[in-house]
Amino acid sequence: MPLHNPLWEIAEPYLVATTRYTVADPTYGRYLLPHHAPTQQLMATPGVRHTFRRVFLRPFRDCKTWHEAYNTTEIVHSDEVKLEEAEVAEGVKHGGRWLFYSVWEMDEPEAGWECGGKGRGRDLVLVHGLSDYGLRYSPHVLHFLKEGFRVIMPDLPSYGRSTGVNSYLPSLDLLPAALHTVLTDVVMWDLKQDRKQQQVFLCGASMGAWTVLFYVYRYHPSDSVETAAEASTSDHPEPPRPQIAGVFALCPMVEASPESRPSAIIEYLAKSIKFFAGSLPLAPAVRGNVSDDPRVEEDFFADPLCYHGLLRVGTGLSLLDGMTELNQNAERINIPIRLIHGSSDRATSHAATERLFQRLPHDDKQFELYDGYEHIMLKVGIDDADDEKRQRVLRDWTHWLLERCG
């Protein structure tokens, strides 16, 4: 397929629907791309183990409505993968719609676990933002592994090694449904290995933070008390909900900052062409507004698995719809939670995050505004002094997590 050709990306869905064209690689070349340097470094770290997995959903063509297609969490197959060429064709045979995720664990260090290893027996799920993919969190993973956490990083639909036209989201319902599917697969994978179901902390930045907040609203994890082991011995009609212990959200996508929201004219144009050109790249959105350090975007563009194009029409409108629905249902996000945001964020609104925080019902809720921080709150520094801002966030994050691991 011609990569990054807007006209082709508009025409292709119609050709597929009329069976005139078959997508040989549903990730559009992303599945076999090389790992970015920080991921290679993490993989080479002594004592660190990783597993790559895929979980398959029913393909869109097998769903009766688009609503069903976007919200399905029915797992039709799952397996471990090695990112080999043959797996692409294999995946097409299983329906061609899959979610990729990675699982990271660490052997106990010779000097012992940090903070007494209080994170052992718990999962930390890191959900990425717009134009990124799961392993973009690689520079920060070792910090949590040393405390005993198992770290899980999914690629959301249309990102990284998951399937779909890169960064095309016709509905944001795809994101919480994908997260739920991955979490369910982790539980079932553990049970097959005779491992106990683990408590889960959901974490994310920007669109990833929206995803975990919306997940809590949509799936009501606090309503679920039955464990997977109990459900496996009952007549439970569906897989049980994962046991969510809390949410840590960085710069959540509650509302777009004025600097990044497209003009009213662009939004009107987008709405008028959404139904026949939803995948058309149209607006710069957050481009240039995530950090005042040029090295951040240099690293982003150096990573071939990131999406480097303009915001697509359908994605942009879905983001606006998703933010509206999240704000309308803030009172249903009932879980221990900490929200942090930078006061200089030019991509998402810290004021909107604080307004949402005031409406959250749970007694265990916290909000902190980081003075001077921009949208990228975990920028890796070039030396200890430059890295201190990131370390402050990691210390905050760790402290909050470990307080809830008693």
Image (cartoon, rainbow, N blue to C red):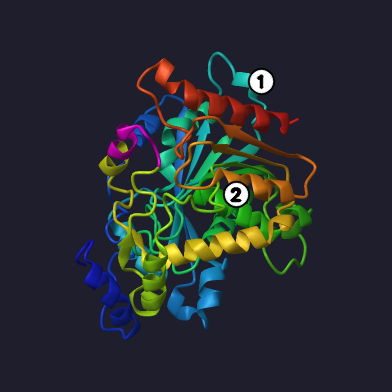
Say which label, 1 or 2, has the lower sequence index: 1
Label 2, residues with CA under 10 Å away: few <14, some 14-19, many ≥20: some
- Look at the image and say whether residue 80 sits in the magenta stretch: no
Where's residue 13, x and y in %? 33, 76
- Going 34% across and 69% down the picture, which residue do you hit? 279
- Going 34% across and 48% down the picture, which residue do you hit? 287
382 or 53: nearer the viewer: 382
Question: Would residue 241 be seen by someone viewing this image from the given angle?
Answer: yes
Where's residue 59, x and y in %? 45, 73
Residue range highlighted in magenta: 290-298
Specify the farthest residue to the top.
111
192 or 156: nearer the viewer: 156
205 or 313: nearer the viewer: 313
User: Is 50 above or below relative to 41?
Assistant: below
Question: Would residue 147 be seen by someone viewing this image from the given angle?
Answer: no
Where's residue 209, x and y in %? 55, 48
Q: Amino acid at mark 1?
A: Gly
Where's residue 63, x and y in %? 50, 79
Specify the farthest residue to the left.
2
> Disc 2 designates what residue?
352
- Check disc 1 and report its element: helix, strand or loop: helix
User: Is 184 above or below relative to 400?
Assistant: below
Q: Nearer the viewer, mark 1 or mark 2?
A: 2
> Disc 1 designates what residue?
116
Locate residue 185 relative to residue 56 in the image: left or right: right
Locate residue 193 relative to residue 103 in the image: left or right: right
- Check disc 2 and report its element: helix, strand or loop: helix
